[in-house]
Amino acid sequence: IAVIVLTIVLLRVYIKIKPFHIPATLPGPKRYPFIGYLWHPLRYWSQWPTETCRLAKKYKRTWGGPLPNFGSLPGAYFYIHEERNMKHILQNPTDNYVKGNMFRKVLGELLGGGIFAADGESWRVQRKVMSHMFSRNLLRHSAAVTKSKLMRIARSFR
């Protein structure tokens, strides 16, 4: 009877936390049963920004994979690399791309109540207010300044 109870408990836990089904055609790090590609970010955690850039260069398109659905892990991650995908996300109804309460709970202190943590109508209002700040020239200039500052910070760690 103990084996049956344990099996039922483990099955219920798995159903609760199982990774989302992500088509195998989406490139990404090696996937494992039950944990998806969780092993990859854990393995490269100390250099994760560098690793995501390496993978973006390797796949040359949007990539990602499944993760367990517990804590702050949402069941899947996607790294948007293609301009058309980014346009789709930014121009289509935001209800398709909800961040949710767990996202705000984990990153709320860092992101505050601004556009990066907002969903739904709040996001639309904030996007409208901020839309004037996102001209192509301003974004190019901001990207160049950000890269310059990040390179200076990176050099200080060497």
Image (cartoon, helix red, strand yellow):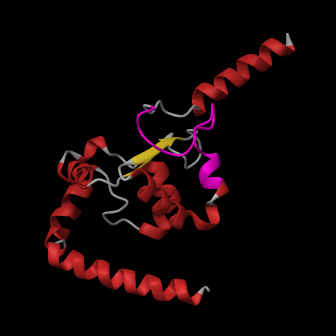
Q: What residue is rendered at 71% in x and 17% in y?
A: 8
Pick the residue in front: 77 or 12: 77
Q: Quadrant of residue 97?
A: top left
Which portion, as a residue range, is magenta?
A: 24-42
Above or below for 37 versus 121: above
Counting from the top left corner in percent of width and height, residue 146 is at: 36, 81
Counting from the top left corner in percent of width and height, residue 1 is at: 85, 9
Q: Quadrant of residue 81?
A: bottom left
Residue lying farthest to the front in this orientation: 58
Above or below for 88 versus 69: below
Q: What residue is rendered at 42% in x and 67% in y?
A: 111
Pick the residue in front: 59 or 91: 59
Q: What residue is rendered at 41% in x and 34% in y?
A: 25
Main SS, magenta region, reads: loop
Q: Is residue 36 left or right of residue 77?
A: right
Counting from the top left corner in percent of width and height, residue 21 is at: 47, 30
